[in-house]
Amino acid sequence: MKTKALLLAALSAAAFSACQTVLQPATVSQVSVNPQIVKVVTDGETKTVQLTANCDWETSSSAAWVTVAPASGTGSTSITIIAAANSGDARDATVTITASGAATHADLLVTQSGVQQVTPGPDPTPTPGGTTISNATQLAAFIEEAPTLAADEEWTIEADIDCGGAKIAPIASFSANLDGKNHKIYNFVVESSDSRAGLLLVNNGTIKNVIFGSSDGKAYDGKSSIGFAEGKTGEYAGLVAENAGTLENVANFATINYAATSEKPGDYIGAGGISGLASGAASFINCTNGAAINATGAVTQEVGLGGILGYTQSSDVKLVSCVNVANLTISIPVAKVIMIGGIAGRTNGTILVEKCENKGEIAYEQDTKPSTWMAIGGIGGVFYNGATVTECKNSGRISSNLQQVNRIAGILGTLNRGGTVEKCENSGEISLTQAEANANWQAAGGIVGSQEREDAAPAKVIGNTNTGAIKVNLAENNTGHQNRIAAGGIFGLGTLVTEVSGNTNKGSVNLVNGGNADSWAGGIVGAMVSTTSDYPTALSGNVNSGAVSCKTGDDALSAAGGVIGNNGNYPGKTDNKSITVTGDKNTGAITCAAAGRVGSIAGINLGTLTNCIAGGSVNGTALSESNLGTLTQGASSSGKANGTTLAK
């Protein structure tokens, strides 16, 4: 008990500031306290006493069960008397405050009641425990006791708490319930010696209605941070390193400092403003991230970086009504895969992401390319295995300057192995710029960058809207990869998609490749290609009004369509499958130097266009009844266009 009290006093000393008084040489040193007698309860208690002084002073206690914080100081201030619990008879102690360099002192009497002796009787019915947190001292007590709290305990925060710059060791685990009542905890530093960094290393309980790292609840306090101790590196970092419980209405502004390692602590790593890793049936409800995420070192594992969540391998994870307002930029060398999302970096299960929003700029700026590929999205980097993304929004600019395989989009960089993206909106600019020659395939989209993996379930992209500009500018890309280069107002490149329907694009799509590689641009889809008949792909009811243009170093390799740039032409594949486009509409201006690979609906069409509505213009020529048959699809198309009508 004595050790615990001393630890609490030490942390309290960091949380309270001492006032300074300028002393004149002739002034007599004086100290006094008010009140002069303090009574504390048997279970232990903390009391605040006013100390008046015109000099330096220090305190001492006649008994170990009473400690004082701060133990010394200068001038008038308040001091905290901390009394440990009493398991015996009533007792007294004297706290002495002595003026430095003088015989003057003041005494404070502390009295504590003892344990009442009662006749033993039947055990009472147990009830859940609970307490409140109102100041830095009580917060320190909570931090120390948190790992031992039972799941049914209820704690509340009753006031905003300035931690005074205190260095806090992470809470190893938490399984109880904490309601912050919308109060703020700020001005703190967390330094972890573990392979995880967070104010909490593992949360199995419920934390709600609390704001971290902000004194006003709106912006970073300029001081709070969470990271690894000097010389330490690790796997996960976030406000909560690993969340396996519920985080609801939790906001974080404290900077996350992730220190990567060239060694391999795990197969993947994650950093997030709210949580680095989610496990089990973790829930993130109405959480907000305003924290910068700083990464240092070099990474040799898969990296998931997200405004809310970095990485999860679990199913049944939920992210609902969460918002990222921070700009996320990573610029450290990555030797494997990097996945960045305004909400989540990578998910690998049947998770739900609903009504979430990204407002920050998401960017990768690096001269050293990863050894494999990367994905960036306003909501998610890569979502695997049946994720559902619905009613989400992005307004932040999404960009990359990397000379590597990019999958980049306003909502999801990559949607793989099934899943649904539905009723989402992007208004942010999508920018993919590569200043150096390279030979890596690329995919950019207003909603989804790419979708692939023909070894699993298909995906659906339904009822989404894009108004952001799609800009792909490659100095010289000569890729020979079958996926080539694709950009679309809704979807960049798909290789196994069952349904793309009811989507609307109003943003411009501009693809420029100074190299000699097939490049495809579309108002809805850049390219849709498949070699399987198990999941026949269909586009239906999509509408484009955005301008679409495509240009390559060898103009004959460019293709542009108002709905789809390349429908079914998979270079190097001989078993391409038919893709149907039904009832889609274009009124945008379509521009492409390859006259045989440009059309109001499709640039290259190997499938079937049925009952589409063609309008706008093709290479400056407005569509009319007289040219409808020749300008609906590119002249080199081998597919059919049936029942096309002119847009009114």
Image: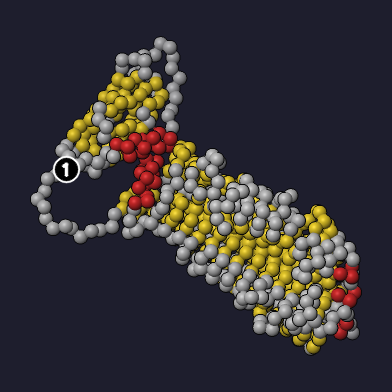
Q: Position of residue 530 (x, y in %)?
A: 72, 78
Q: Nearer the viewer, residue 413 or 304?
A: 304
Left/right placement of residue 31 relative to residue 436 reads: left
Q: Residue furthest top?
A: 26
The residue sitting at 43% across, 45% down in the picture is: 160
Q: Where is residue 416 in the image (x, y as percent from the top left)?
A: 63, 70
Q: What residue type is labelled 1?
A: Val
The residue sitting at 32% across, 50% down in the picture is: 131
Q: Which of 467 and 70 is in front in this view?
A: 70
Q: Residue furthest bottom?
A: 643
Q: Can you tell which quarter of the image residue 308 is in? A: bottom right
Q: Which of 387 and 183 is in front in this view?
A: 387
Task: Give SS at disc 1.
Answer: loop
Locate the C terminus by quadrant. Answer: bottom right
Residue behind mark 1: 115
Q: Nearer the viewer, residue 567 or 252?
A: 567
Locate the N terminus by quadrant. Answer: top left
Q: Can you tell which quarter of the image residue 545 is in? A: bottom right
Q: Is residue 327 shown to the viewer in this render? A: no
Q: Can you tell which quarter of the image residue 515 is in? A: bottom right
Q: Where is residue 100 in the image (x, y as percent from the top left)?
A: 37, 18
Q: Position of residue 276 (x, y in %)?
A: 53, 55
Left/right placement of residue 359 relative to residue 317 reads: right
Q: Residue furthest front?
A: 263
Vertical placement of residue 334 versus 597, above or below: above
